[in-house]
Amino acid sequence: MTNYDTLAKRVLEGHQLTDKEAISVLDSPDDDLLPLLHAAYTIRKHYYGNKVKLNMIMNTKSGLCPENCGYCAQSIISKAPIEKYSMMKKEEIVAGATRAAELNAGTYCIVASGRGPVNRELEIVIDSVKEIKSKHEHMTVCACLGLLKPEQASRLKEAGVDRYNHNINTSAEHHESITTSHTYNDRVNTVNIVKQSGISPCSGVIIGMRETQQDVVSMARSLYAMDTDSIPINFLHAVDGTPLGGTDELTPFYCLKVLCLFRFINPSKEIRISGGREVNLRSLQPFGLYPANSIFIGDYLTTNGQESDKDFQTLKDMGFEVDLEPLAKEPITV
């Protein structure tokens, strides 16, 4: 039996998990879940104490995407009945930021479907961010607009974008099983462009897309190597009408083990429980905050989230505190 507390102590001393240790976390007996969560919490508490960052997402452009990602209701191959609309006006995007501020969400995420932003869309985002920053000086603004060119990243940085999200989604080995309209390296390249522009990089994964445990380990290691500041972990919310519709591989216990693994491999990073937590973690959602230190509140892109008051009640009941500090490059060790 793995001594998870000892493993957590070694991680805090700089140890990187071996493949055998990483798989043992994912493959651990269900009876070991509480000791595993406690060990992951030891690492999380070291860097983040009992604070939880709140994020809110705004889907500023829905559908109309030429990519063929098998999980996405907005892709060109999806038959899911979703609302489709072109880029929102600046006023709508800014109003979303005000709503996020009212909910104590420290990070506001501006998301738009598509391969990458065209000039008109980029200009709207830039104008929106400038106004948001003038009204909410300490709010972290994150953009997620697809593949970026260096000059686009530079302009977003100048406008005040603090963070840019571009998920790797899955492992390099599994990528072509999920999409063929862009490569895994296309995604990694965008993250590197973001880093070079001085914007904080955010990149994460989607768990439950018929990947292997070794794929999951590879994802966690890739994000460690990329040195991303924030790692959103989505659990597939399979949507009818997409190629992955009907996929149902996850259990709440396994989802929690995945969160623990990512904390062990990326000990100092913001780990954010993202889309699909409500349908996959279900009644065990609160336990996810032992390894993770960040969640989304409100709805996601094309699926509904949990009512915000339930999330706030969970935080209160578990003794967690909302983290309202502005974005910092490195976590503060508690």
Image: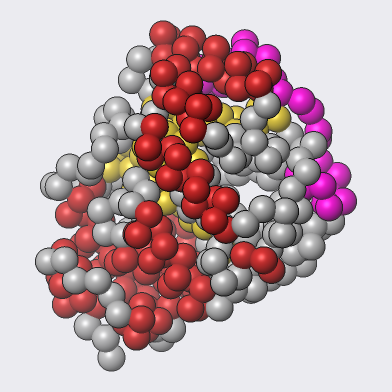
Nearest to the observer: residue 313 or residue 130:
130
| Quadrant holding the N terminus | bottom left
Nearest to the observer: residue 232 or residue 290:
232
Residue 35 appears anywhere in the view? no
- Horizontal placement of 9 versus 329: left or right? left
Vertical order, 14 against 29 (above or below):
above
Q: Position of residue 162 (x, y in %)?
A: 39, 28
Q: Position of residue 112 (x, y in %)?
A: 65, 33
The colour scheme is secondary structure
**Residue 270 magenta-highlighted:** no
Quarter occupied by residue 118: top right
Quarter occupied by residue 64: top right
Vertical order, 104 against 211 (above or below):
above
**Residue 82 magenta-highlighted:** yes
Residue at x 17%, y 42% (from the top left corner)? 332
Residue at x 60%, y 39% (from the top left corner)? 146
**Range of the magenta residues?**
74-102
Q: Position of residue 103 (x, y in %)?
A: 46, 27
Furthest residue toward bottom: 1
Residue 196 appears anywhere in the view? yes
